[in-house]
Image: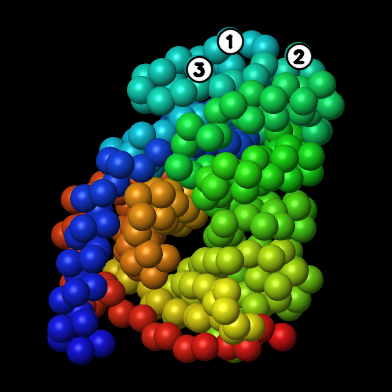
Amino acid sequence: MANQDSRKLELDCHSALESLPDSQVLVIGDLMWDEYIRGDALRVSPEAPVPVVLMEKEERTPGGAFNVVHNLFDLQVKCGIAGVTGNDENGRAMADAARAKNAESIHLWQADDRPTTIKTRIIARNQQLLRVDREYAKPVKKELEEKILSELEKVIPTYKSVILSDYDKGMLTQRVITGIIEICQRHNVFVAVDPQVRHFKHYKNAGVMTPNEKEASDGIGMQFPDEDKDAVQIGLKILKELQLKILLLTRSAKGMILFETNPDSDTVTCHTIPTVAREVFDVTGAGDTVISVYTALIASGTSALVAALLANIAGGVVVGRLGTATVTADDLKARIDDDHLKYRTFTEEMK
């Protein structure tokens, strides 16, 4: 990029971040509690060859799709939340957590056939020893599918964009996924998907998908990419088979590839964006941060490329922090410079 182009790109990025409060995003997906039991493991149990953890602290935070809400909240984006919980105290506590975030709207459906999902991690000296999942992940009943779609038909048109956060815990069935995408299409609402491999083919006609390389290759039935050209072919196949306009393929230490279909020709504009992470401590939640930043920016009128560049910066920030981290607009503004805005553009034929 020439200096003049670089300066314009920096200005575009700053302008995009200033527009974040104008965004409205509805997060729909699987809700759960992330529970942490922290302590010290000083001896081995006499009952079995396992460590005995002396608990020092217990904490929990709403997770799953709620991680996306955490990210949007810290970006000062107006957001709502929709999901399924059990008919239990943990489900009611989830509603309290949403109210504490000042969610624009809260749509939680209680299912009598399942508990609210809880994932308990036992940690000693910053090392996770064990995870215990309490869940019932079968698809929700047809009556609840009807109820969900009926309410979302009224709610979705009040938002500029929707994020589907799919953890395959039963809420986002094929019928619910396709129904949500159809509602979004009818009302011109942008829909972004953080995909689950098992549901890959259900996301047809979404506005954007943000899979990592493993999700992308497994979901479309191709080998994990060894080289850049392999990743490009995977992306092109996803675009064609799922009829997507945009694909944002995250590649860990290799950065991202943004694919944009060109409506006037059978070509795809590809932008390879190198990683900007300086250190990697924890990749937990990085995907939630990427889709949150990208979707919020698109909802405020930002171009796909600028949104991807800023999402890439955001991903680089959170992997340098321990635990499920988030970013603020100020975090991103502080990193807008030539080193963080590199990319290469080329065109591919849609085969």
Query: Given the image, on which type of amino acid does mark 2 rest?
Result: Asp
Residue 212 visible, this orientation? no
Horizontal side of 128 relative to 6 (left or right) equals right
- Badge 1 element: helix
Q: How many marks?
A: 3
- Badge 3 element: helix
Whether residue 137 is situated above or below residue 106 in the rendered picture: below
Give the residue number, with chain letter if any, for mark 3: 95
Question: Which residue is located at x 21 percent, y 82 percent?
Answer: 5
Label annotation for residue 112: 2
- Measured as percent of width and height from the top left, residue 33 is found at 54, 28
How many angstroms separate mark 1 from mark 2 (CA)? 13 Å
Q: Nearer the viewer, mark 1 or mark 2?
A: 2
Question: Which residue is located at x 62 percent, y 55 percent?
Answer: 206
- Measured as percent of width and height from the top left, residue 234 is found at 67, 77
Residue sitting nearer the eye, 296 or 65:
296
Query: Given the image, on which type of amino acid does mark 1 rest?
Result: Glu
- Measured as percent of width and height from the top left, residue 261 is found at 56, 74
How many angstroms separate mark 3 from mark 1 (CA)? 10 Å
Image quarter of residue 323: top left
User: Dot 2: within a 10 Å radius of its alpha carbon, few (fewer than 14), some, or many (20 or more) residues?
Assistant: few
Which sits earlier in the primary sequence, circle 3 or circle 2? Answer: 3
Query: Given the image, on which type of amino acid does mark 3 rest?
Result: Ala
Whether residue 94 is situated above or below residue 289 in the rendered picture: above
Label annotation for residue 33: none
Which sits earlier in the primary sequence, circle 3 or circle 1? Answer: 1
Question: Which residue is located at x 49 percent, y 72 percent?
Answer: 258
Give the residue number, with chain letter if any, for mark 1: 89
